[in-house]
Image (cartoon, rainbow, N blue to C red):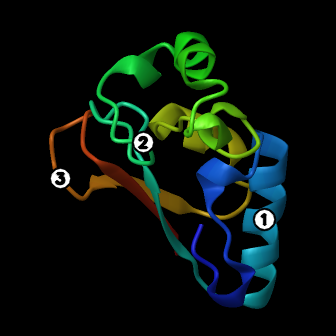
Amino acid sequence: MAGGKLGLRSEHLGNDQARAKALSELLRVAKRVYITVPNGLFPVEHHTGIPLLHYLPTLFRRVLKGSKLDYWTHPENMDFLNKSRIHAFLPNGIRFHVAFCGLKLGPFSSNIALWSE
């Protein structure tokens, strides 16, 4: 999540509860929010540049563990989000739009945007 000095990135927050808390904090201090995150269904994982392996998160983490990319093997540092995962942490009572953006490839688009009304 982009949040100015908050420096939040949703895929780096660890779990849906932490993402919901960060989003609630952004909504507390702003009238509206606009956030983009990498789409976990995009064929190339954004942080490592590795194609397809992230479709199997357990294998992805096992293969990269102990390598120079080990940081990305920890769920608290990176989680693989898609549209349905995003809907799981959106707060009730606030209308959000969720759409693909970036390189547009339908459900395999590079990024997902969400914004509040």
According to the picture, the residue beneath numbered tag 1 turns out to be: 22
Amino acid type for the residue under numbered disc 1:
Ala
At horizontal 53% and vertical 61% (from top left) the residue drawn is: 96
According to the picture, the residue beneath numbered tag 3 turns out to be: 103
Name the foreground residue: 19 vs 8. 8
Name the foreground residue: 41 vs 95. 41
Residue 61 image point, x, y percent: 61, 21
Amino acid type for the residue under numbered disc 3:
Leu
> Could you tell me which secondary element the residue under label 3 belongs to?
loop
At horizontal 62% and vertical 62% (from top left) the residue drawn is: 9
Residue 99 image point, x, y percent: 34, 53
Q: How many marks?
A: 3
Amino acid type for the residue under numbered disc 2:
Thr
Which quarter shows the N terminus?
A: bottom right
Label 2 environment density (alpha carbons within 10 Å; few <14, some 14–19, many ≥20): few
Mark earlier in primary sequence (3, 2): 2
According to the picture, the residue beneath numbered tag 2 turns out to be: 48
